[in-house]
Image: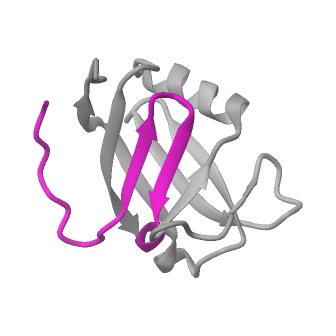
Amino acid sequence: MSEHPKNQNLPAVLRMKRGWELTISRAALEPLGNPGYVRFLWSAQQRVLLIEAADADTPQSLRVGAPKGGSIVFRNHSFLDAILKLTQWNRDSIYTVQGEYLPKLNMVAFETQNVIQEEPSNA
């Protein structure tokens, strides 16, 4: 496992579980006003996954479901496949990334190179 510096500004966490589930802490959406829809953007140069508030009619927006245990869960397989391809993460691993709120952009950023990777257990 690799260590990354703790973000002191926002207790936002994004977690990819074996390529089939992406969870985001509710705290990640609070600075965005807890929107009903979000849009994910990718900065290839910086390898950063960004989240912005969106409307239902915003292209490529995803509906934010009810929180489960303090997290929002996304299970859209085509979306998750795209995230795996962009980040070059292994589908069988579990990835955790701290987020940072960017007030000038009103977005939350997750630097995908600063990730904690857990290998699957054989249990």
The structure residue drawn at horizontal position 89% and vertical position 60%, both measured from the top left corner, is 57
Using the image as rendered, state which of residue 38 and residue 106 is in the foreground: 38
Quarter of the image containing the N terminus? Answer: top left
Q: Is residue 17 magenta?
A: yes
Q: How many marks?
A: 0
Q: Is residue 10 magenta?
A: yes
The structure residue drawn at horizontal position 41% and vertical position 20%, both measured from the top left corner, is 92
The vertical placement of 26 against 4, above or below, is below
Is any part of residue 71 visible from this angle?
A: yes
Left or right of 113: which side holds 101? Answer: right
The vertical placement of 96 against 91, above or below, is below
Q: Residue 83 placed where, x, y %?
A: 55, 31
Left or right of 51: which side holds 88? Answer: left
Quarter of the image containing the C terminus? Answer: top left
Q: Residue 63 placed where, x, y %?
A: 75, 60
The vertical placement of 60 against 106, above or below, is above
Using the image as rendered, state which of residue 10 and residue 106 is in the foreground: 10
The structure residue drawn at horizontal position 61% and vertical position 48%, both measured from the top left corner, is 40
Q: In the image, which residues are magenta?
A: 1-28
Q: Residue 81 placed where, x, y %?
A: 62, 25
Is any part of residue 103 visible from this angle?
A: no
The vertical placement of 19 against 4, above or below, is above
